[in-house]
Image: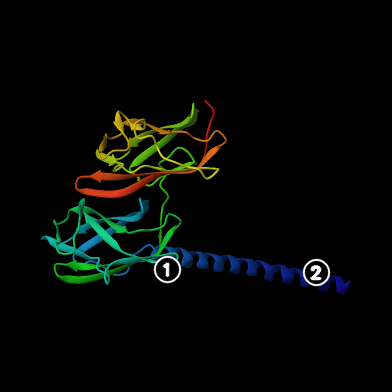
């Protein structure tokens, strides 16, 4: 009888200790969660500042062969702040996830900055800016370190941004195709045989709030089928709207208006079942600014008529 009572008391004591241990572990978990959350918040902030200005970083996205870090800068003083970003070899730069160093350049208020002329930021007016990280491979998904240097009213500044995850642009309707220009919605329609040729149809739609132009610059597409045969587009039969695609002439895309594209690939092997790659280069023009862009298909099946 005494042994039974002692055994019950021991079980009770162990249960009480277990309850206290569980409460202690829960408290420890909450503390750890708070620490981690606070740490994550701090990693979203840049170290350093621009004299007389606040900067809000809005996005980091792939654009053509580059990466754009978009931001809004506001002059918080009562008079103009003249800002000049330094993008010489010892100036602003970025390091990707493979530790490769990339050069940069900047746009402020829609204008590309040069090395010599500052931009006057008016008092208390938010101004959009872009830091362009040059020549970033499309397989790179983050920037490990980004350094911004320059002068504000002749006062030098330096900022260091935390890790920037490069967002994927969702601007196509098919897993077969990617489009490097975020402002362009490219919708693939079909890829079919027509006699000896293969015809690809699609639509281009300007999904921004401004008109811009695209131009192939008279450059043809790079095309390979699954058997390794190479091809080009038919210059006389490939169109965007009523305009020949392969031309030096720019084609204006109106905001929100789809434009049909037809690309003809002549004399495709009858035994080819798909295109391993179709890369369509073009140049984007807006005001005095231009960037190199592309549309790229991978493993695109060829359908029968």
Residue sitting nearer the eye, 179 or 92 = 179
Q: Secondary structure at mark 1?
A: loop
Q: Residue at x 52, y 64 (%)?
A: 30
Q: Earlier in the sequence, mark 2 or mark 1?
A: 2
The tally of labels here is 2
Q: Position of residue 129 (x, y in %)?
A: 25, 55
Q: Position of residue 6 (x, y in %)?
A: 82, 74
User: Position of 203 compared to 76: left or right?
Assistant: right
Q: Nearer the viewer, mark 2 or mark 1?
A: 1
Residue pointed to by mark 2: 8
User: Position of 86 compared to 235: left or right?
Assistant: left
Q: Quadrant of residue 237?
A: top left
Q: Secondary structure at mark 2?
A: helix
Q: Residue at x 52, y 67 (%)?
A: 32
Q: Quadrant of the N terminus?
A: bottom right
Q: Residue at x 57, y 35 (%)?
A: 271
Q: Position of residue 83 (x, y in %)?
A: 17, 63
Residue sitting nearer the eye, 8 or 127 = 127
**Label drawn at residue 99:** 1
Residue sitting nearer the eye, 204 or 60 = 204
């Amino acid at each position: 009888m005494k042994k039974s009572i002692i055994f019950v008391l021991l079980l009770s004591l162990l249960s009480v200790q277990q309850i206290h241990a569980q409460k202690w572990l829960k408290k420890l978990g909450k503390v750890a969660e708070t620490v981690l959350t606070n740490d994550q918040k701090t990693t979203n902030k840049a170290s350093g500042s621009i004299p007389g200005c606040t900067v809000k970083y809005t996005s980091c996205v792939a654009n053509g062969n580059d990466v754009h870090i978009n931001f809004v800068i506001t002059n918080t003083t009562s008079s103009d702040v003249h800002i000049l970003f330094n993008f010489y070899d010892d100036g602003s730069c970025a390091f990707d996830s493979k530790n490769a160093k990339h050069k940069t350049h900047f746009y402020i208020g829609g204008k590309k900055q040069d090395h010599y002329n500052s931009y006057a930021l008016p008092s208390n007016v938010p101004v959009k800016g872009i830091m362009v990280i040059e020549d970033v491979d499309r397989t790179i998904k983050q920037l490990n370190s980004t350094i911004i240097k320059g002068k504000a009213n002749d006062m030098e500044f330096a900022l260091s941004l935390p890790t920037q995850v490069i967002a994927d642009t969702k601007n196509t309707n098919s897993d077969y195709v990617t489009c490097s220009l975020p402002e362009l919605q490219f919708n693939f329609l079909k890829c079919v045989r027509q006699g000896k040729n293969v015809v690809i149809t699609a639509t281009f739609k300007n999904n921004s709030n401004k008109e811009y132009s695209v131009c192939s610059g008279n450059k043809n597409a790079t095309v390979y089928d699954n058997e390794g045969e190479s091809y080009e587009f038919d210059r006389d039969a490939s169109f965007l709207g009523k305009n020949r695609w392969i031309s030096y002439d720019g084609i204006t895309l109106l905001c929100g208006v789809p434009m049909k594209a037809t690309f003809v690939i002549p004399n495709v092997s009858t035994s080819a079942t798909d295109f391993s790659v179709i890369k369509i280069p073009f140049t984007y023009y807006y005001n005095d600014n231009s960037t190199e862009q592309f549309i790229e298909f991978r493993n695109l099946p060829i359908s029968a008529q």
